[in-house]
Amino acid sequence: MEELEHTCPQPRTTLTEPAIFAKETSCECRAPHEKLTVEQARLGTPVDRPVRVYADGIFDLFHSGHARALMQAKNLFPNSYLIVGVCSDELTHKYKGFTVMTEEERYEALRHCRYVDEVVRDAPWTLTQEFLEKHKIDFVAHDDIPYSSAGSEDVYKHIKEAGMFVPTQRTEGISTSDLITRIVRDYDVYARRNLQRGYTAKELNVSYINEKKYRLQNQVDKMKEKVRTVEEKSKHFVYRVEEKSHDLIQKWEEKSREFIGNFLELFGPDGTWKQMFQERSGRMIQAFSPGGSPSSSPPRDFSPSRSPSPPSRWVVPRTSPPSPSSPKGASASISSMSEGDEDEK
C-alpha cells in the first residue's frame, strides 16, 4: 500500500486567477540574473529561479493558434516563467494595420490563457537591450519565419545572433488573417445575421438599399424555414394518416366480410328470410282458401237407387220461374206453392 501511495500522481492544482500585469520590477528573485544557454536551461538550471521566456505579438481575435504557440513557449524548459508582451493599438495600426479588438480587450484575452504567467502592456515593436534587462528575459520565443517590419527584414535578427531565440511552430489553418478573410468573404451573411439580432444599419455601416435587401432576404429565409417546417410536419401527418388508413382498411374489410356473411345468412338461397317468407305465404294461402263441408252434414249421393224421390211439393216445374228478384216472380212462386198445398188437401 505504501508503494502505491508513493507512485500515485498528485492532483494538479487548477488555475483560478488570471495572469498578473507586469510592473516596473517584475522579477522578484534576489539572485543575480546570470545569462543562460539553451542547454543549461533545458537541464533545469539554475534551481533557485525559473527560466524567464518572453513571447510577444498582437494577439487580435485570440484563437487556438495563439494558445498553442504560448503552450510551446511555456513548455520549452522544465522550469519556466512565461512573459507575454502585447503591442498597443498605436503601434499595431502604424506597423501592421487595423485590429478588430482594442488593446484592452487583447490584454484581457492574454491574461486568461492558462500558459501565461505575466502580461506586458504596450510592448515595444522591436526588442531593445534595455527592455530585455528590465524584465530579466532569458529567451525569446517565436516562430522561425523572418518577421519583416519597421524597415527591418527580421525584427528578431539581433535576438537570434545573441543566442536568445527559441523557435516555436505555427498552427496551420488558423490565424487572425484567416478569420478576417472568412468574415469578409461571407460579409452578407454576417450583416444579415446581425441585423436580425437587433443591430442597426448605422452600426454595421450598411447602406439603406443593402439594409432593405438584407431584411428582405431574412424574410425569405424565414419563409423557407416555415415551409420546411410545414413539409416536415406534413410528412409526419401523412405517415400517421397512412398508418391510420391501413388500420381502417383492415377493419373495413373485416366488417365487410361480416356484413356479407350476415346478409347471405339472412337473404341467401337457404336463408332465414326465405323460410319466413314461405311460412307467411302458407298462412296467407290457408287463410284465403274456402272451408270444407261440415262433418255433421251427410254426404250427397246422386245414385238413383239410393236417393228417395223428393216429395211432390219440392217438384220444380220445368218451366223456369221468373227471377225472384222481381215482385212478379215472387208472387208467382208464392201462388204456385199455395196451389200445391190445396192439391194435397
Image (cartoon, rainbow, N blue to C red):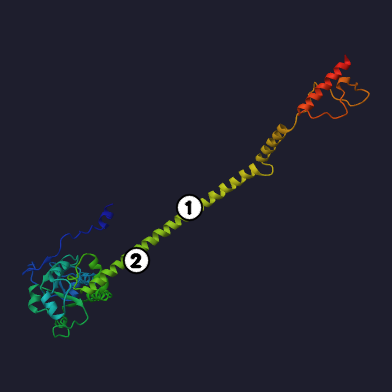
Residue furthest to the left in view is 24
Q: Residue 162 sits in which quadrant?
A: bottom left
Disc 2 from disc 1: Cα separation? 30 Å
Residue 303 sits in quarter:
top right
Instruction: Return the residue nearer the eye: 167 or 243.
Output: 243
Q: Which mark is residue 224?
A: 2
Q: In front here: 227 or 262?
A: 262
- Residue 25 in percent (x, y) is at 6, 69
Compared to residue 2, the image places residue 91 above or below, namely: below
Q: Position of residue 330 (x, y in %)?
A: 78, 25
Q: Is 297 in front, or is 217?
A: 297
Instruction: Point out residue 114 in the picture as x, y percentages from the top left corner.
Output: 19, 65
- On the rendered structure, is 117 left or right of 214? left
Q: Quadrant of residue 232?
A: bottom left
Circle 1 sits on which residue? 244
At numbered mark 2, what does the secondary structure look like: helix, strand or loop? helix
Residue 149 as seen in the image, left or right of residue 313 = left
Label drawn at residue 90: none
Query: Residue at 61% of width from left, 43% of height from top?
Result: 262
Which amino acid type is marked by label 2?
A: Lys
Asked if one can make out residue 180 in the rendered structure from this viewpoint, the answer is: yes
Mark 1 element type: helix
Mark 2 is surrounded, within 10 Å at the Cα level, by few (under 14), some (14 to 19) or many (20 or more) other residues, namely few
Q: Give the residue type at disc 1.
A: Lys
**Residue most extreme to the top:** 345
Q: Of callouts 2 and 1, which one flags the residue occurring earlier in the amino acid sequence?
A: 2
Q: Quadrant of the C terminus?
A: top right
What residue is at 15 percent from the left and 61 percent from the top? 17
308 left or right, relative to 123: right
Q: Dot 1: few (<14), some (14–19), or many (≥20) neighbours within 10 Å?
A: few
Q: Relative to residue 94, is residue 43 depicted above or below?
A: above
Identified at 12% across, 65% down, the residue is 20
